[in-house]
Image (spheres, rainbow, N blue to C red):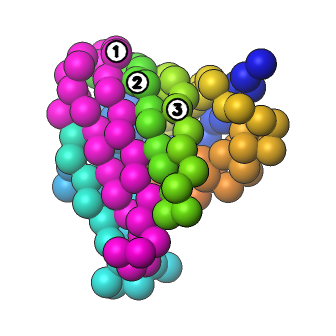
Amino acid sequence: MTYELTVQRVLDAPPAAVFEAFTDEAAMREWYRGPDDPPDAIVEVTCDPRVGGRWVAAWGDSPEAVFRETNVFTVVDPPHRLAMTSSASTPDGQTLDTEVEITFEEYGDRTRVTIVQRGFPAEEVRDYFATHAWVGAFDRIAHYLMKERS
């Protein structure tokens, strides 16, 4: 048995800008490094937003504490939808393979982002992603978009 999560956030930017934040390498390098991260934190990102293309990221506080994620796009429909397979690893060697779908819906002059992630091996892992991992990503993307608009 595997577990699924759905998370949503409304972001203060139009869908095209939010979609770009999820697929542009320069934007991703900036938001992966959150406003509270040390300036020497490791952030490496490449992204080829096309079906079969890869979004590869590595981030952490030191070379010994790097998280890695490789996503392979299965759907790229700008600025409405992304879908991908995701393989992640933690510094202590744990791995996680899931499927992720992200939709970007116009919500007035903002965007409602919905993320559905499937394949969690345990409720605790799913709940961590729902309450920490995606919350942190949304917060960093919102901060990035705010800076871009000012």
**Relative to 134, 127 lies left or right:** right
Neighbourhood count class around disc 2 (C-alpha, 10 Å): few under 14, some 14–19, many 20 upward:
many
Name the residue that disc number 2 marks: 84
Residue drawn at x 54%, y 28% is 98
* Residue range corresponding to the magenta coloring: 48-77
**Residue indicated by mark 1:** 75
Residue displayed at 67% across by 31% down: 120
Tell me where residue 71 appears, x and y as whole percent. Answer: 36, 34
Q: Nearer the viewer, residue 148 or 86?
A: 86
Label 1 and label 2: CA atoms lie apart by: 7 Å
Mark 1 neighbour density, 10 Å: few (under 14) some (14–19) many (20 or more): some
Alpha-carbon span between mark 3 and mark 1: 17 Å
Q: Position of residue 43 (x, y in %)?
A: 31, 65
Q: Earlier in the sequence, mark 2 or mark 3?
A: 2
Q: Is residue 127 left or right of residue 55?
A: right
Q: Is residue 143 visible?
A: no
Image coords of residue 58 (percent x, y): 34, 57
Mark 2 or mark 1, which is nearer the start of the sequence?
1
Label 3: which secondary element: strand
Q: Amino acid at mark 2?
A: Met
Magenta span: chief secondary structure: strand
Sequence-first disc among 3 and 1: 1
Residue 82 image offset from top left, x and y in percent: 39, 23
In the displayed structure, 69 sits above or below 66; it is above
**Amino acid type at image mark 1:** Val
Task: Tell which tag, 3 or 1, sits nearer the viewer.
Answer: 3
Q: Are marks 1 and 2 in contact (CB under 8 Å)?
A: yes
Q: Classify residue 144 by image quadrant.
A: bottom left
Mark sitting on residue 97? 3
Q: Quadrant of the N terminus?
A: top right
